[in-house]
Image (cartoon, coloured by chain):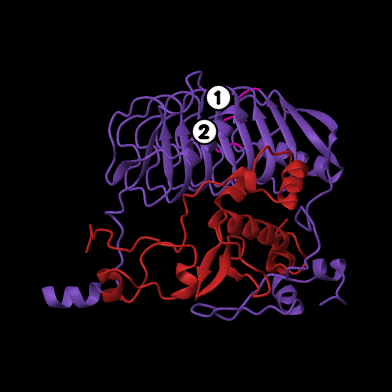
């Protein structure tokens, strides 16, 4: 594998590349592979393919007359040249802006963005000095996203990791299907927030709409204000000292710590009444039939 | 059987699933032959007094004030062995026997975070080969 050069790989078809790299296309369903950590692994803090960027190397990009695809492509190009801080000017509500950034970067967006902004990111720190449309930070893997104003519905849908922060209020279905990470809302959140949540944490400093945490499987929701109603299987839990310390730290970090502290927050978790483990189902069904 | 209620067992101690790999405790678990739920507390938030120097350096390099995505990483227990779930390969990676485990979950979680990070950033991670083979752009 080591004898194949990058240029040779690029000139191959995908099928040829797969074979040349010693991979196969056989069905792996039901098979497992033993893998163990190497404690002597070299210290490295970024993915091997990540561009080497310097936070102190800064540039600006006027996006007024560019398409989203052109902007996203230009961001990658600038990162490959070592720019670690990029300022996007005049975003004018473009959709799908700054998606798929997979390494560290400081990105400042001066204005508002449209749908699906900064989705599928893994590492960057993004600041939006305006509003964002639906599904901001969707499927985010790591990094921080800070929205200065309000956000639309499905804020942080299916987020896997990182901090997604909106200093204003957000729409409905915030953190729908979230699988990790932290969503922080400085204002209020709409109905069905935390719907089908599986893991991660959501903090709302203001009020929550109807059906909070409906059908949540796991994870934690902290609400600082009033809760209109709980969804199916969402229950209140005890706020521990560890929770309080963590909340204090997290909210202070983003300048959202309430003047009265965090003791008044309500902690909401899954009641686990919807957990289905159906190994027995075929037998039970036969008995019923 | 929609609406089947949770009838799993509570986590009693940090070594529970090292000593009992199957983890069948409640009647329901014995009935279906499967442990219900995670083998660790997925909702445990990190204790920042226990950060390792390596993790502190990682936070500094990434420009983060906290552990960010690593807050969701915990040491789990798979087939009676300590292991960490790697989302990038959708599988468990085992902690070598040579590593001595601390007596509490918080410190174990910090070790798990450090090991996972080193593994994910290394050239021997399966994603490196996968990217070469399948990356479109």
Q: Assign the N terminus of chain A to one quadrant of the image.
A: bottom right
Q: Which of A133 and A256 is in front in this view?
A: A256
- Residue at the image position 48 percent from the left and 79 percent from the top: A30
- Residue at the image position 71 percent from the left and 75 percent from the top: A18
Q: Nearer the viewer, residue A101 or A258?
A: A258
| Classed neighbour count for the residue bearing mark 1: other residues with Cα under 10 Å, few (<14), some (14–19), many (≥20) | some
Which residue extends farthest top? A259
- Chain of the residue under the numbered disc 1 shown in the image: A
- Residue at the image position 54 percent from the left and 34 percent from the top: A115
Given contact means CB atoms under 8 Å apart, are the residues at marks 1 and 2 in contact? yes
Residue B133 at what x, y percent from top left?
72, 69
Q: Can residue A142 be seen in this view?
A: no
Q: How far apart are marks 1 and 2 (CA)?
A: 9 Å
Earlier residue among tags 1 and 2: 2
Query: Mark 1 falls on what kind of element?
Result: loop
Residue A154 at what x, y percent from top left?
45, 37
Query: Mark 2 falls on what kind of element?
Result: strand
Question: What is the magenta range?
Answer: A111-117
The residue identified by callout 2 is A184
Quarter where residue A121 is shown: top right
Q: Are marks 1 and 2 on the same chain?
A: yes
Label ID, residue B18:
none
The residue identified by callout 1 is A256
Q: Is residue A7 visible?
A: yes
Q: Assign the C terminus of chain A to one quadrant of the image.
A: bottom left
Which color was chain A given? Answer: purple
């Amino acid at each position: 594998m080591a004898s194949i050069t990058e240029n040779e790989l690029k000139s191959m078809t995908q099928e040829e590349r797969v074979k040349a790299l010693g991979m196969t296309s056989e069905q792996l369903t039901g098979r497992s592979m033993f893998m163990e950590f190497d404690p002597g692994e070299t210290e490295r803090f970024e993915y091997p393919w990540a561009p080497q960027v310097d936070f102190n190397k800064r540039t600006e990009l006027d996006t007024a007359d560019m398409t989203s695809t052109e902007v996203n492509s230009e961001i990658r190009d600038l990162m490959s040249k070592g720019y670690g801080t990029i300022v996007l000017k005049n975003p004018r509500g473009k959709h799908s802006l700054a998606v798929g950034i997979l390494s560290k970067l400081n990105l400042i967006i001066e204005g508002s963005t449209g749908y699906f902004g900064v989705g599928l990111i893994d590492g960057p720190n993004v600041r939006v000095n305006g509003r964002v449309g639906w599904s901001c930070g969707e499927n985010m893997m790591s990094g921080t996203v800070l929205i200065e104003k309000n956000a639309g519905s499905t804020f942080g849908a299916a987020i896997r990791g990182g901090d997604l922060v909106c200093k204003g209020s957000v729409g409905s279905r915030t953190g729908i299907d979230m699988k990790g990470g932290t969503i922080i809302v400085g204002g209020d959140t709409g109905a069905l927030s935390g719907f089908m949540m599986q893991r991660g944490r959501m903090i709302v400093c203001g009020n929550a709409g109807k059906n909070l945490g409906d059908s949540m499987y796991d994870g934690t929701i902290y609400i600082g204000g009033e809760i209109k109603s709980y969804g199916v299987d969402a229950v209140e839990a005890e706020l521990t000292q560890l929770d309080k310390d963590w909340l204090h730290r997290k909210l202070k970090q983003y300048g959202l710590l309430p003047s009265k502290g965090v003791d008044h927050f309500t902690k909401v978790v899954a009641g686990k009444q919807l957990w289905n483990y159906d190994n027995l189902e075929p037998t039970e069904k036969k008995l019923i039939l | 059987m929609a609406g089947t209620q949770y009838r799993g067992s509570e986590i009693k101690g940090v070594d529970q699933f090292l000593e009992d790999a199957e983890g069948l405790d409640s009647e329901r678990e014995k009935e279906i032959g499967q442990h219900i739920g995670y083998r660790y507390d997925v909702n445990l938030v990190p204790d920042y007094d226990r950060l390792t120097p390596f993790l502190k350096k990682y936070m500094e390099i990434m420009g983060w004030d906290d552990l960010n995505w690593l807050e969701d990483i915990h040491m789990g227990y798979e087939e009676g062995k300590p292991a960490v779930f790697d989302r990038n390969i959708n599988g468990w990676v085992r902690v070598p026997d040579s590593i001595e485990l601390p007596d509490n979950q918080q410190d174990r979680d910090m070790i798990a975070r450090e090991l996972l990070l080193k593994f994910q950033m290394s050239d021997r991670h399966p994603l490196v080969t996968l990217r070469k083979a399948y990356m479109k752009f």
